[in-house]
Image: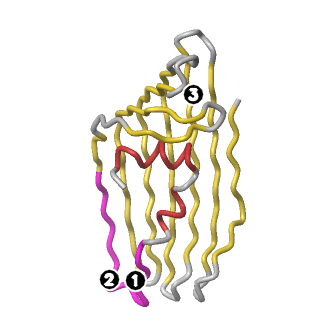
Amino acid sequence: MKATRLALQCAVASGCLLGALTLPVTPSFARAFTDNLRVDLPTEPYTVDVPCLGPAVITDTGSLVIHTASNGNVRHFVEVANGKTVVDPLDPSLPTYTGTFAAHQTHVDFVDGSRILTFTSSMTFKSSGGSVLHLLLTEHLTIHADGEVRAELSNIRCH
């Protein structure tokens, strides 16, 4: 998945944590390290089903910062995305929305193969007609070393 789609697609499609499940977990981490990466998100339209609104073409710009660290036993990833978004519903009777998004994803990999993932996102959009749409998403998953996936919290709200 391209970085441009990460924050908004994850927030509106509620699939960010599931995408993180495909990251490899190695039985041991080679060494301690820390690293940071900042990426400007290019403008690239894509279509996604927006809660409370339906299918829409999304165009967003912003930045993504990824911080990774390991102490040799635990690997920790933090991804933060912020930016501006235009939401153009496919239903021509609905107005276009513009606004901002902020997303935060954390996952921790343990040497035994278990993993903890948390994702939160907040978006506020104002329509060309003056109405406001707020989207809030919170998810938390725990994956045990034996591969059992347990969703502890999954909540998306729009108002």
Instruction: Provide the secondary structure element on which disc 2 rests.
Output: loop
Instruction: Provide the secondary structure element on which disc 1 rests.
Output: loop
Measuring from the top left, give residue 139's x and y in whole percent. 64, 56
Contact (CB < 8 A) between labels 1 and 2? yes
Q: For residue 72, which numbered disc appears in the image?
A: 1
Measuring from the top left, give residue 24's x and y in whole percent. 41, 78
Q: Nearer the viewer, residue 122 or 42?
A: 42
Identify the amino acid type marked 3: Thr
Specify the farthest residue to the top: 129
CA separation in Å, label 3 and label 2: 41 Å
Q: For residue 31, which numbered disc appears in the image?
A: 2
Position of 138 with respect to 21 (left or right) is right
Instruction: Name the residue carrying label 3.
Output: 124
Q: Earlier in the sequence, mark 3 or mark 1?
A: 1
Identify the amino acid type marked 1: Gly
Above or below, 10 against 71 in this view is: above
CA separation in Å, label 1 and label 2: 5 Å
Q: Nearer the viewer, residue 100 or 32?
A: 100
Above or below, 122 against 98 in this view is: below
Q: Earlier in the sequence, mark 1 or mark 2?
A: 2
Q: Nearer the viewer, residue 88 or 38?
A: 88
Q: Which residues are magenta?
A: 23-37
Above or below, 17 against 130 in this view is: below
Q: Quadrant of the N terminus?
A: bottom left
- Identify the residue at image location x=54%, y=56%: 15
Circle 1 Cα neighbour tier, 10 Å, few/some/many (<14 / 14–19 / ≥20): some
